[in-house]
Image (spheres, rainbow, N blue to C red):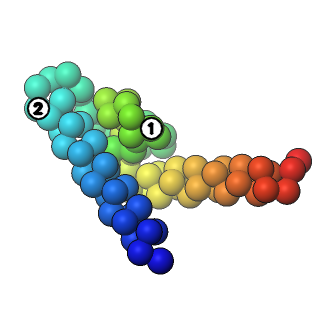
Amino acid sequence: MKLSKYKRTDTITLHNKVRAQTKKAIREGILIRPEFCQRCRTSKVEEEHHRDYSNPLDAMWLCRKCHIEVGREEKMKRDIEIVRRKYGD
């Protein structure tokens, strides 16, 4: 049980590092935060979403609603892949 707790802590730490790098890039003008959500194109951007934390400057700019939906979709894809690996196609 402690192992999963440490793994979660490591993920949170990585998440915070990536967010800090993204904010720094915005301050330095390397990244430009769009005004509207890149998914629905109607709502104001509230959050950035990183599909791959190894590339912190590759972010999707999303409203809260779309960020939740994208997170759910990605989790579902990961879960399906786990089941496929475990039980085959």
Q: Nearer the viewer, residue 6 or 47?
A: 6
Q: Secondary structure at mark 1?
A: loop
Q: Residue at x 31, y 50 (%)?
A: 15
Q: Secondary structure at mark 2?
A: helix
Indicate which disc residue 27 carries.
2
Which quadrant of the view contains residue 56?
top left
Q: Residues within 10 Å of mark 1 (few under 14, many from 20)?
A: few
Identity, as a three-letter code, of the amino acid under mark 2: Arg
The reply to whether residue 79 is in sight is: yes
Indicate which disc residue 60 carries.
none
Which quadrant of the view contains residue 9?
bottom left
The reply to whether residue 37 is in sight is: no
Q: Nearer the viewer, residue 53 or 2?
A: 2
- State the residue lying farthest toward the right: 89
Q: Residue at x 51, y 54 (%)?
A: 71
- State the residue lying farthest toward the bottom: 1
Identity, as a three-letter code, of the amino acid under mark 1: Asp
Vertical arrangement, residue 26 with respect to residue 88, above or below: above
Marks 1/2: CA–CA distance: 21 Å
| Circles 1 and 2 in contact, beta carbons < 8 Å | no
Residue identified by numbered label 1: 52
Q: Residue at x 46, y 68 (%)?
A: 4
Q: Where residue 3 sits: x, y (%)?
A: 44, 69
Q: Residue at x 39, y 34 (%)?
A: 54
Q: Nearer the viewer, residue 52 or 10?
A: 10
Q: Is residue 21 left or right of residue 68?
A: left
Q: Where residue 39 sits: x, y (%)?
A: 48, 40
Q: Where residue 85 sits: x, y (%)?
A: 77, 50
Q: Is residue 86 left or right of residue 49?
A: right
Query: Which of the two labelled residues, at mark 1 and mark 2, occupies the earlier sequence position?
Result: 2
